[in-house]
Amino acid sequence: MFLKRVVAKKILDSRKEPTIEIFLNGVTASSPSGKSTGKYETPCYHKSLEWNLNFLNKIDFNIHIKEFQDLRKVESSIKKKAKLKDVKQFGANALFALECVILKALAKEKNLELFQLLNKNPKKLPVPVGNAIGGGLHSHNKGAPTFQEFLLIPQGKTAKQNVSIMQNIHAQLKIKLLASKKNDEGAWQTSLNDEQILSLLSKFGEVRIGIDAAASAFYKNSEYCYKNKTLDRTTQIHYINSLIKDFNLFYCEDPLQEEDFKGFARIYRDQNHLIVGDDLTATQISRVKKAIKFKSINAMIIKPNQNGSLIELAEIFKLCKQHNIKTIISHRSGETLDNALADFAVGFQADFMKAGISTKWREAKLKRLIEIEKIIN
């Protein structure tokens, strides 16, 4: 495929906030955007969304693209033409959307599925992770729980079964919570506290449960500030460990603030309990290496637009596999209808795919995962 020019424009994400969409050879790709953002993630754009749009609509690439690794040529070209020291200075949203549309166009030319460009014979499908009940920065009600997400990890035998399990429980929760409103990610809003929610979720069969504490969001003046208590670092570690034990939490994301690599290492984990880095690692390979050094985590969130470079994303997946760190490729709170996340989940052989449960923006990824399952089988 000869890459010459692309067309970039501004669209609105699921929160009605502006993001980027790029057109190339009859295909499109767009980037989501996060609300709960880590300090270390790549900025969305170079100077502004408008700057990136203007740059992309003027640049002549003149590059032959034959395989995934040819994205290195694209990154080199951007660095040179935009006069950047690091291609990620171009902005993660813009870079990810560009590299994604290039791969989609290449797959179309080769008559392949997008995931097949990355992996011709995938051995497994990721297990979906769904945000069922929301709190923290993702919710809009004053009485929201402190933790940001209360998660379902289904245990069905197929992707289709797993999606069905999550959707059925999500529907039941509407009745049990007397809920009428959903948050940014399609999770139910409630005024129940963290432990009441975990108690409720632990009664459902067919799923394991988890939390995204997003602890950096309620860490202030060296303390963890809940609605009814304030905990120091040591007490927070003990509290999280007690929740893991009492509710058999399979999944615990960002239980401590994003600088505490040594503290993460003190949170209980084994093969049945995942301690997941998100803000801690921010999909940056340097942060992943630090987490490995301190033995902070045994699983990590990978958000493509938190980094921008799909080349570096591939290196992160490889590094995680080498060190037995489970990988969870993830959506963002502000999503688009682009369903490529499922292809990247399968192509990079992620262990899990965190893509929500409800609303058309989340369902697009889940439906694509089911489609891929049919193609593989």
Image (cartoon, rainbow, N blue to C red):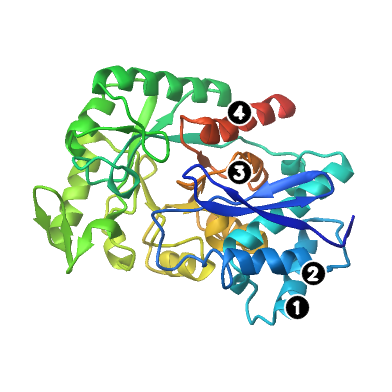
Q: Residues within 10 Å of mark 4 (few under 14, many from 20)?
A: some
Which element carries disc 2, helix, strand or loop?
loop
Residue 321 falls in image quadrant: bottom right
Q: Where is mark 2, residue-wise?
A: 59
Q: Where is mark 4, residue-wise?
A: 367
Residue 81: mark in rendering: 1
Amino acid, disc 1: Lys
Amino acid, disc 3: Leu
Judge depth for marks 3 and 1 and give the one in front: 1
Residue at 51%, 58% (x, y): give it: 323
Marks 3 and 1, the one that precedes in the sequence: 1
Alpha carbon separation for disc pair 1 and 4:
38 Å
Label 3 with label 2: CB-CB less than 8 Å: no
Residue at 62%, 36% (x, y): give it: 124
Q: Residues within 10 Å of mark 2 (few under 14, many from 20)?
A: some
Q: Is residue 321 visible?
A: no
- Give the percent coordinates (x, y) of residue 154: 44, 28
Q: Is residue 301 visible?
A: yes
Label 1 with label 2: CB-CB less than 8 Å: yes
- Is 17 located above or below residue 121 in the figure? below
Q: How many marks?
A: 4
- Give the percent coordinates (x, y) of residue 192: 18, 33
Which element carries disc 1, helix, strand or loop?
helix
**Which quarter of the rendered picture does the C terminus lie within?**
top right
Which element carries disc 3, helix, strand or loop?
helix
- Is 27 located above or below residue 74 in the figure? above
Q: Where is mark 3, residue-wise?
A: 341
Judge depth for marks 3 and 2 and give the one in front: 2
Which element carries disc 4, helix, strand or loop?
helix
Marks 3 and 2, the one that precedes in the sequence: 2
